Image (cartoon, rainbow, N blue to C red):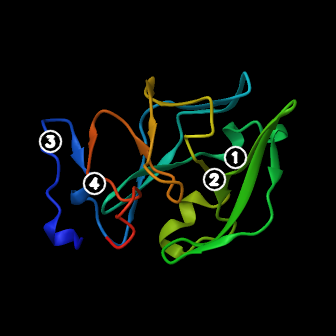
Amino acid sequence: MHPRFITPDPTAPGEESVWDYPRPPRLERVLARVVVEFGGRIVVDTEAAWRVLETSHPPSYYLPPADIDTSLLEPAGRGSICEWKGAARYWTVAVGDRRAERVGWSYPDPTVDFRAIRDHLAFYAGPMDRCTVAGEVVTPQPGGFYGGWITSRIKGPFKGGPGTMGW
């Protein structure tokens, strides 16, 4: 289905529709506490995050390396390319015997518009035990390809589920 045939979910004051987000995407500072937990450990706890807003996607949150417990991270090999941000590097989170493979990604040399997130990490919410924004537990973006985080104030429909790859 072509995006012009998508009917966005209605929004109320204080809510955002992903269909109002720009393309190309925009980088925006987050003025809320963001926490990622895995294996009984805090992977990151920060009030210095950024989010990327892109049409049809819930925001992806990029977290500063200074607030990440990097002892829980391992390089995960093979990267990918984002047409907007550049070449990504992937990370595995490991706590004891628990591992979440290729669940984090970062941009060591992002494009000019995304320089502020150099070496910041984003995480897929699904494999983590818990990810929160301003104390609210997030829902992962549908499907397994994109890494957006859905909160109660973000409205779709969202790209990522079955039948949406062509949006």
Rounded to the nearest angstrom, the CA distance separating label 2 from label 3 is 30 Å
Q: Which mark is residue 14?
A: none
The residue at the point 71 percent across, 69 percent down is 79
Residue 165 is situated, as x and y percent measured from the top left of the image, at 39, 68
Rounded to the nearest angstrom, the CA distance separating label 1 from label 4 is 27 Å
Rounded to the nearest angstrom, the CA distance separating label 4 from label 2 is 23 Å
Please tell me which residue lies in front, 137 or 142. Answer: 142
Residue 39 is situated, as x and y percent measured from the top left of the image, at 74, 27
Instruction: Give the structural element (helix, strand or loop) at label 1.
Output: helix
Image quadrant occupied by the C terminus: bottom left
Question: Callout 3 environment at 10 Å: few (<14), some (14 to 19), or many (20+)?
Answer: few
| Marks 4 and 2 close (CB-CB < 8 Å) | no
Question: Between disc 4 and disc 3, whose residue precedes?
Answer: 3
The residue at the point 23 percent across, 45 percent down is 16
Question: Between disc 2 and disc 1, whose residue precedes?
Answer: 1
**Amino acid identity at mark 3:** Thr
| Marks 2 and 1 close (CB-CB < 8 Å) | yes
Residue at label 4? Answer: 18
Image quadrant occupied by the N terminus: bottom left
| Marks 1 and 4 close (CB-CB < 8 Å) | no
Residue at label 1? Answer: 65
Please tell me which residue lies in front, 75 or 25. Answer: 75
Residue 121 is situated, as x and y percent measured from the top left of the image, at 64, 51
Rounded to the nearest angstrom, the CA distance separating label 2 from label 1 is 6 Å
Seen in the image, is 105 located left or right of residue 126? Answer: right
Residue at label 2? Answer: 120
Question: Between disc 1 and disc 3, whose residue precedes?
Answer: 3
Question: Between disc 2 and disc 3, whose residue precedes?
Answer: 3
Q: Nearer the viewer, mark 1 or mark 4?
A: 4
